[in-house]
Image: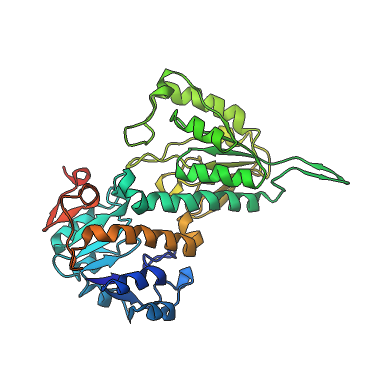
Amino acid sequence: MKISVLKDAGGQEARVAATPETVKGYVKTGHEVSVVKGAGAAADFSDADYKEAGAKIVASNAAAVKAADLVMSITGGDAKLVAAMKTGAGITGLLNPTDNPKYAAACAEAGVTAYALEYIPRISRAQSMDVLSSQSNLAGYRAVVEGAGIYGRAMPMMMTAAGTIAPAKCFIMGVGVAGLQAIATARRLGAVTTATDVRPATKEQVASLGAKFIAVENDEFKEAETAGGYAKQMSEEYQKLQAELTASHIAKQDIVVTTALIPGRKAPVLVTKKMLDTMKPGSVLVDLAVERGGNVEGAKPGEIVTTKNGVHIVGHLNWPSRMASDSSNMFAKNLKAFLPLVTAEDGAYAPDWDDEIIQGCALTRDGEIIHERLKG
């Protein structure tokens, strides 16, 4: 199989879809790998590293995709790039198909099979391919570390001859993969940590990490989780009750990290301006959902906003890319685990269309859009 690794464009993207380590493994098993010049530079992987691993360095994305059977990327590139691919080839990445349906249409028109890695089913067999989890894990860690840096005070309790410094109070809103890592990180840094989520199963997870769970635990709360493990859209009545509890709690916090996302929908607003007005000067809110509208009222994508009362709202984009080397390593290993599903016994490119993972993440096939989420 001919594999090409793109240099993902964009000011916020520093990751790369294959590392010298995974490239070496691909070459060893008989695949031919091309890597675009400078593809891994922002993640601290040099062209020389890729060449040593057995890859061929090519000048551009356009040159890389022409003969490729499978294109590995973070974002999938654009419609123009897809049009340059050969019919029947495949392309992987976080393709954002719900917000960018024209991309899937371009892949179908070009006869290219697009694999949206964010649609990989959350089943036990696919855990090693779960790019959303691997990237969210690092985002949760980085959010607390950067929040602590902006907060500018000590996180743990410190008892000194000059007096005692009280520990910081950290509140994590949303206990998915990012939230769990945020809790663990805040605890390691010594903060008094609390967390909230509408899914009942998360209460035990929060407690296992040594944090305190905060939520309105009524009958609706007990059934607030989909079969896939995601949060359900809650009623207005529940949201009001939860907001009242959150408002009283958030006024006492030093660092708040919000991670609440519902697939395919605008992020719910969890922290209103009224709540912000009750917070102490110097406190920090880190909004991991800012790319989908944000959980914090007043958050701005790509900016740190300081309110009139001195509260800092952090709206950085693409958190995994802020740890490009580690996130690339994890993303690349996810793709390495995915590769056998599109590889025949003789090493040729041949997706297994009977496999539920391929069925779950393939957007297009033979010139048609096939994914149910994109039909109609």
Above or below: residue 171 compared with residue 302: above
Above or below: residue 36 compared with residue 281: below
Task: Give the quadrant of the N terminus.
Answer: bottom left
Say which of 63 and 192 sits in front: 192
**Residue 222 location (% of width, % of height):** 42, 23
Quick one: which residue is furthest to the top in this view?
219
Residue at the spot 64% in from the left edge and 37% down from the top edge: 253
Say which of 295 and 19 sits in front: 19
Quarter of the view holding residue 348: bottom left
Residue at the spot 45% in from the left edge and 77% down from the top edge: 46
**Residue 315 location (% of width, % of height):** 51, 50
Q: How many marks?
A: 0
Say which of 367 and 279 sits in front: 367
Apparent side of residue 303 relative to residue 346 in the rendered image (left or right): right
Above or below: residue 267 compared with residue 331: above
Residue at the spot 69% in from the left edge and 46% down from the top edge: 155
Apparent side of residue 191 relative to residue 84 in the rendered image (left or right): right
Residue 271 visible in the current orientation: no
**Residue 344 location (% of width, % of height):** 18, 63
Residue 99 visible in the current orientation: yes
Task: Give the quadrant of the C terminus.
Answer: top left
Say which of 11 and 364 sits in front: 364
Quarter of the view holding residue 252: top right
**Residue 217 location (% of width, % of height):** 49, 21
